[in-house]
Image (cartoon, coloured by chain):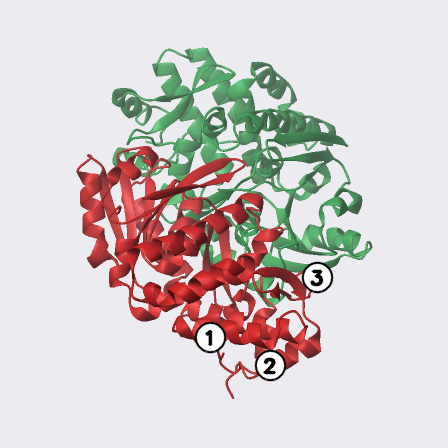
Chain colours: A red, B green
Amino acid sequence: MITLNLSLPDTSYPIHIGQHILGNAELLLPYLKQKKAVIISNTTVAPLYLAPLKAALEQHGVSILTVTLPDGEDFKTWETLNLIFDALLNNKCERSTTLIALGGGVIGDMVGFAAACYQRGVPFIQVPTTLLSQVDSSVGGKTAINHPQGKNMIGAFYQPKVVIADMMLLDTLPERELSAGLAEVIKYGLLGDAGFISWLEEHMAALRAKDKTVLAEAVRRCCAMKADIVSQDERESGVRALLNLGHTFGHAIEAGLGFGTWLHGEAVAGGMMLAAEASRQLGYLNDSDVSRIEALLHAAGLPTVSPNLGYEAWLEHMSHDKKVSDGAIRFVLMRELGHAIVAALPEPVLHATLHSRFIAK
Amino acid sequence: MITLNLSLPDTSYPIHIGQHILGNAELLLPYLKQKKAVIISNTTVAPLYLAPLKAALEQHGVSILTVTLPDGEDFKTWETLNLIFDALLNNKCERSTTLIALGGGVIGDMVGFAAACYQRGVPFIQVPTTLLSQVDSSVGGKTAINHPQGKNMIGAFYQPKVVIADMMLLDTLPERELSAGLAEVIKYGLLGDAGFISWLEEHMAALRAKDKTVLAEAVRRCCAMKADIVSQDERESGVRALLNLGHTFGHAIEAGLGFGTWLHGEAVAGGMMLAAEASRQLGYLNDSDVSRIEALLHAAGLPTVSPNLGYEAWLEHMSHDKKVSDGAIRFVLMRELGHAIVAALPEPVLHATLHSRFIAK
């Protein structure tokens, strides 16, 4: 097991990465203020991993309440969040009751937001069960639900007490979900570490074959980069925005097709391809850089051609992006491979990008 | 105009108290990150005070969006909160758009919570229009909505950028609402300043006659106490709980009768009377202390006898209180007049209190 630490001005927490650590209650016990915890999962993950986690904690005398939510991005809504609040109130959960998120990014984001709001804040723990949530969403304290007009529009910055990333849980992860997680993994290379791009090209087959040692190394590198960036800029007033590479286009795909049609990681892959194309048009990347990104996404089993939402619909969806400032959409682009920047796009470049070969005809 | 300052580890903000300061845009302009703001009010307050505030800001080139919500505690719900989010998204409000809460405690709590959650946090300003919100809820950053099972159960600690308390706005405040505000004013005396109790006995007639100078002095003293307490304990892990004197019983009254039946201040008055009676039974207060509190609440036009919810219903409603810890309800009591403490109540004392003359037969 490897342990990273995320340090912030007023808190700091460990990220444990390893194999067979789900049942290691010792990793969680220091963060339970009382001998009571609520494990919140979904209908897909709960049958697989709820029992061992629950049993491990109960062996240490922790009384466990469980809440099982419907699975999927289209349930990342206020209505589902209220199922959590109802359960907490029906069971008289207190300010010192710890919530445990057992699931992927949707569960982690919702449980984190529920923890941020319930009685104005209770402790919570992230136990991410997908590659995507292990490398990205479980770390850094961004929590949210979707609004019909935009992804993650209602939320909070609220940090977990500890993150437990167990590679063994990826054994049951469907191939499509694994690929979606690899989109965020590739993102880290593209935005900040050209050497990691080469490493990924070399290890993509092992990653897709779920080699646990290789997966753990990928998760470690991503979490280390994320911890470094978040510790510099918790509230995304600067450098943290770079973690949104591919996300402005990607969120438009998700909203435009309806949440859940494309997986978040698939939409990010399409979005990174468009960000690469825009960067090429600005002269930042050359043709071979773009082809290399395209090949890496393909190798990861990801789409590189985004759906044709129509130019006006693209603009409308992107106008709700949280990076919009004084009416201008701001994009994360690549100044070169492994070096992202935030910039506005001249309208002709945006137009050409959204009519390029990376948009479905 | 008097200006107090509330200092916290990572922020600090001014509380301006005066007459005819609503239209002084200079007090707000430093806190608008962009020349755009959203004034959120209700159907009662908007016709009275929205136009002058809007005009003052527009004169300085600020573009103003307005949102008018239904009025009342029973609208302090997720559904109403969503009306704010819908308006913000429909108008493409950004992370740097400032929200201005123009109204009483319900508006302030809801707009503050909307500001805490919209895009994970936008700036907001409190312009309280009731005595209750001027002396209490607009200061200190507690924001929330109600859940059917409990008041203020879903919320955030989120501080405003500035508070503008204009005494002139109290001219249109109905007598019943003024009295409700006086309940929170009296609370400050009972919990921490015996001298203020005497001052209130002396000035109650002037307060109820809306003498602006006397009102401003009461608001100043309350805000100074609140700023002092909140600066010591923003997240209510200790001394801040004393500000909940009367609120554990009071919230049960509000929930038990249905939110909005008794005004919050009325419920707090009933709750403080019960806290006084429990304190007397513990030997902390004597009969004449209790009579003095009763007389002061009467003089303020407040109820001193709480509705008979039934003992089991009292316990059930109070079991959801945010101060519950390890299953035990914790009460704010008076060790002596002007000195509150937090303690559990022995069951026989609680039983006797809830069967005393301060409960309706």
Residue type, mark 3 in image: Asp
Same chain assignment for discs 2 and 1: yes
Q: Quadrant of residue B127?
A: top right
Q: Which mark is residue A311?
A: 2
| Residue B247 in the image, given as x and y percentages of width and height | 44, 32
Q: Residue at x 36, y 42 (%)?
A: B256
Q: Which residue is mark 3?
A: A326
Point out the frontmost of discs 2 and 1.
Answer: 1
Between discs 3 and 2, the one toward the N terminus: 2
| Residue B353 in the image, given as x and y percentages of width and height | 33, 23
**Relative to residue B231, is residue A12 drawn left or right?**
left
Q: Dot 1 surroundings within 10 Å: few (below 14), some, or many (20 or more)?
A: some
Q: Nearer the viewer, residue B74 or B3?
A: B3
**Relative to residue B4, is residue A95 drawn left or right?**
left
Is residue B23 in view from this perspective?
no
Gap in angstroms between the C-alphas marked 2 and 1:
26 Å
In the image, residue B310 sits, relative to residue B147, either above or below, namely above
Labelled pair 2, 1 in contact (Cβ < 8 Å): no
Q: Dot 3 surroundings within 10 Å: few (below 14), some, or many (20 or more)?
A: some
In the image, residue A157 sits, relative to residue B202, either above or below, namely below
Q: Which residue is mark 1?
A: A295
Between discs 1 and 3, the one toward the N terminus: 1
Residue type, mark 2 in image: Tyr
In the image, residue B188 sits, relative to residue B268, either above or below, namely above
Residue type, mark 1 in image: Ala
Labelled pair 1, 3 in contact (Cβ < 8 Å): no
In the picture, the quarter occupied by the C terminus of chain B is top left
Please, which chain is the residue tagged with disc 2 on? A
Please, which chain is the residue tagged with disc 3 on? A
**Relative to residue A351, is residue A261 drawn left or right?**
left
